Image: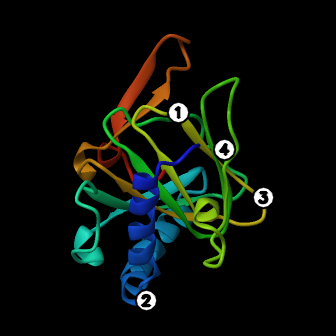
């Protein structure tokens, strides 16, 4: 996806925050809880938990209202989703995967890696509100990502295609579900 200079600047600010050793040390326990949840639920394709914004201090861009840790199971394709009420910025924290954007019939590959030496565009993706996306994870290892949204954690809506109708979708709030799916 094309990126404006303003959006690139936002991602660079988020990247600087996540490069902080102190921030990474505070995120690690959240990631470990999410990993334990995924290990408990063998059927789940992913698990998640919000990250308290206090972890990031005052360094986040003002439009960021929630942060999340997700772990996606190796070999998972979690299916198409979009967020009608939030712009998402996501970073590959550990491992790698393909965060495809676009929608059925015209998915565009965006392979992301966790190598801190890789270019920003190889580690981060910006997904505007209402853009369909789907993570596809390689078979070798689970994929840990950190995601930022422009709505509070308890307001984040996930929308997915309705399997019963091509014209309909179904919506749910992430915090209205268990932390594994």
Q: Secondary structure at mark 4?
A: loop
For residue 123, what is the image quadrant? bottom right
Q: Quadrant of residue 17?
A: bottom left
Residue at 50 percent across and 20 percent down: it is: 162
Determine whether the residue tagged by mark 3 lies in a helix, strand or loop.
loop
Q: Position of residue 3 (x, y in %)?
A: 52, 48
Q: Are marks 4 and 1 in contact (CB under 8 Å)?
A: no
Label 4 environment density (alpha carbons within 10 Å; few <14, some 14–19, many ≥20): some
- Above or below for 20 versus 2: below
Q: What residue did someone put label 4 on?
A: 77
- Residue 106 horizontal/vertical position (percent): 69, 27
User: Would you name the residue on which mark 1 appears?
Assistant: 132
> In front of the other: label 2 or label 3?
2
Identified at 44% across, 80% down, the residue is: 28
Marks 4/1: CA–CA distance: 14 Å
Query: Alpha-carbon distance for marks 1 and 3?
Result: 23 Å
Name the N-terminal-most of marks 1 and 3.
1
Which residue is at a point 68% across and 33% down the rendered structure image? 107
Residue indicated by mark 3: 139
x and y percentages locating residue 33 in the rendered image: 43, 72
Mark 1 or mark 3, whichever is nearer to me: 1
Q: State the count of labels.
A: 4
Residue corresponding to mark 2: 21
Q: Residues within 10 Å of mark 1 (few under 14, many from 20)?
A: many
Counting residues from the N terminus, which is met first, the one under dot 2 or under dot 3? 2
Please state which of residues 176 and 4 is positioned toward the viewer in this rendering. 4
CA distance separating discs 2 and 3: 29 Å
Q: Provide the secondary structure element on which disc 2 rests.
A: helix
Please, which residue is most extreme toward the right here?
Answer: 139
Location of the N terminus (image quadrant): top right
């Amino acid at each position: 996806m094309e990126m404006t200079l303003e959006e690139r600047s936002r991602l660079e600010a988020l990247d600087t925050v996540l490069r902080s050793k102190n921030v990474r040390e505070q995120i690690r326990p959240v990631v470990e809880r999410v990993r334990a949840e995924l290990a408990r639920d063998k059927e789940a394709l992913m698990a998640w938990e919000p990250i308290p914004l206090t972890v990031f201090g005052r360094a986040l861009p003002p439009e960021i209202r929630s942060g999340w840790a997700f772990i996606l199971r190796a070999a998972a394709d979690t299916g198409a989703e979009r967020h009608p009420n939030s712009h998402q910025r996501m970073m590959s924290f550990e491992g790698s995967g393909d965060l495809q954007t676009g929608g059925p019939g015209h998915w565009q590959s965006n392979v992301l890696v966790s190598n801190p030496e890789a270019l920003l565009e190889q580690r981060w993706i910006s997904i505007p509100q209402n853009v369909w996306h789907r993570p596809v994870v390689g078979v070798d290892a689970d994929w840990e990502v950190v995601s930022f949204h422009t709505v509070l954690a308890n307001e984040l809506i996930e929308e997915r295609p309705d399997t019963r109708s091509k014209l309909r979708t179904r919506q749910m709030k992430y915090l209205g579900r268990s932390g594994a799916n």
